[in-house]
Image (cartoon, rainbow, N blue to C red):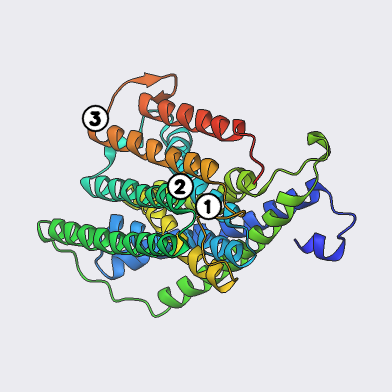
């Protein structure tokens, strides 16, 4: 986006991709620092690592999605926002595969997951499904905008309420487990931890805004390899922006695993998906302020593509839940069977979305 501002007529596709890579590097660096701060924060305040992973890490690492959604809503790129949210949810689950390859040398980290992860992953499915039901229902009332408005507002309220309820359940679960464990000496909270968390969050927000603006330019940029055709907003949201805004989840999860903190790593993955869906109410507000009374209807919204994009993370999360419950020992090469299944379904799902032929 910076190159485009100074050289609007000479910018190349590679230049835009370079900008996205540079912004992504900023996000990764901030995420590594964030993980270490979150671990320190949990120890200082005697909080469960899964809860901190879901609440603190997932919230901050999902700030790119929040910024991307708000920015997309303000500029009227609703497909870009939905593509980024659903695409990020899908890619977040495949981080489990990356964790297995990079850190375990094979097998599956899901075998070590605790019941708290079942709560967050299941509620993630619930929240994504609520958004899909809203999309499908809104389309049934094309000529009744007031009804459509009510459906969107109710769905947004239901997503927020579900998230709050899940966080309360997980906190209670963690506190109950703490009560049965040996009490450790209380560490005096550092006065610098919270301010540093704020600074890292601001860096993440700035880099996320940069990513979003560059992605929007890329979506409309003619690509020579495609015969001068642009990729479109939904596709760029799913392929580029979703992966780019998931970089904090990758960095924090791998860093947490290297710190031997599986609870925080998985809590970040599943908690991020829950928080990602909270981006949709943000998109709703941003779109309304931009003059678009509806976000799930109209020329800026592709129903079929977004429904397909939203179904993919539901299927992937269900596979992950099954992997946690079954704890399979089977391997296919260096990976556990559940990891292979996640990877195959993700690839097939992306191919299916591409095959719709929509360019947003």
Provide residue 252's location: percent of width, then percent of height. Answer: 46, 53
Q: Which residue corresponds to the image point at 59% horizontal and 33% vertical from the top-left?
A: 356
Image quadrant occupied by the N terminus: bottom right
Q: Which residue is mark 1?
A: 82
Location of residue 74 by image quarter: bottom right
Secondary structure category for the residue under label 3: helix
Q: Which residue is mark 2?
A: 89
Q: Which mark is residue 326?
A: 3
Q: Which mark is residue 317?
A: none
Badge 2: few (under 14), some or many (20 or more) residues near its Cα, within 10 Å?
A: many
Query: Spatial distance from mark 3 to mark 1, Cα to Cα?
Result: 32 Å
Badge 3: few (under 14), some or many (20 or more) residues near its Cα, within 10 Å?
A: few
Q: Is residue 68 left or right of residue 188?
A: right
255 is higher (above) or lower (below) than 62: above
Can residue 329 be seen here? The reply is yes
Q: How many marks?
A: 3
Of residues 77 and 303, the one drawn nearer to the viewer in this rendering: 303
The answer to which of marks 2 and 1 sits earlier in the sequence is 1
Provide residue 51's location: percent of width, then percent of height. Answer: 29, 59
The answer to which of marks 3 and 1 sits earlier in the sequence is 1
The answer to which of marks 2 and 3 sits earlier in the sequence is 2
């Amino acid at each position: 986006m910076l190159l485009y501002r100074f050289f609007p007529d000479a910018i190349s596709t590679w230049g835009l991709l370079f900008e996205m890579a540079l912004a992504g590097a900023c996000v990764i660096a901030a995420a590594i620092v964030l993980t270490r701060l979150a671990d320190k924060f949990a120890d200082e305040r005697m909080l469960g690592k899964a809860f901190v992973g879901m609440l603190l890490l997932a919230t901050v690492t999902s700030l790119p999605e929040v910024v991307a959604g708000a920015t997309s809503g303000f500029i009227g790129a609703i497909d870009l926002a939905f593509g980024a949210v659903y695409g990020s949810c899908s890619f977040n689950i495949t981080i489990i595969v990356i964790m297995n390859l990079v850190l375990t040398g094979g097998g599956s980290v899901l075998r070590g997951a605790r019941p708290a992860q079942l709560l967050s992953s299941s509620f993630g499915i619930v929240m994504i499904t609520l958004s899909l039901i809203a999309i499908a229902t809104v389309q049934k009332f094309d000529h009744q905008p007031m009804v459509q408005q009510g459906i969107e507002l109710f769905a947004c309220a239901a997503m927020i309420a579900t998230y709050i309820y899940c966080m309360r359940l997980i906190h209670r679960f963690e506190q109950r487990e703490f009560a049965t464990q040996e009490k450790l000496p209380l560490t005096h909270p550092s006065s610098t931890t919270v301010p540093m968390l704020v600074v890292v969050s601001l860096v993440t927000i700035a880099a996320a805004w940069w990513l979003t603006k560059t992605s929007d330019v890329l979506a409309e940029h003619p690509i020579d390899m495609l015969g001068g055709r642009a990729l479109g907003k939904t596709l760029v949201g799913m392929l580029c922006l979703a992966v780019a805004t998931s970089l904090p989840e990758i960095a924090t999860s791998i860093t947490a695993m290297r710190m031997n903190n599986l609870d925080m790593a998985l809590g970040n993955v599943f908690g991020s998906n829950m928080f990602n869906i909270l981006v949709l109410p943000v998109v709703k507000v941003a779109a309304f302020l931009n003059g678009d009374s509806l976000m799930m209807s109209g020329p800026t919204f592709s129903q079929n593509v977004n429904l397909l994009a939203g179904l993919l993370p539901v299927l992937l999360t269900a596979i992950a839940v099954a992997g946690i419950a079954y704890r399979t020992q089977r391997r296919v090469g260096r990976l556990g069977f559940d990891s292979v299944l996640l990877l195959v379904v993700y690839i097939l799902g992306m191919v299916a979305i591409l095959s719709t032929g929509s360019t947003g």
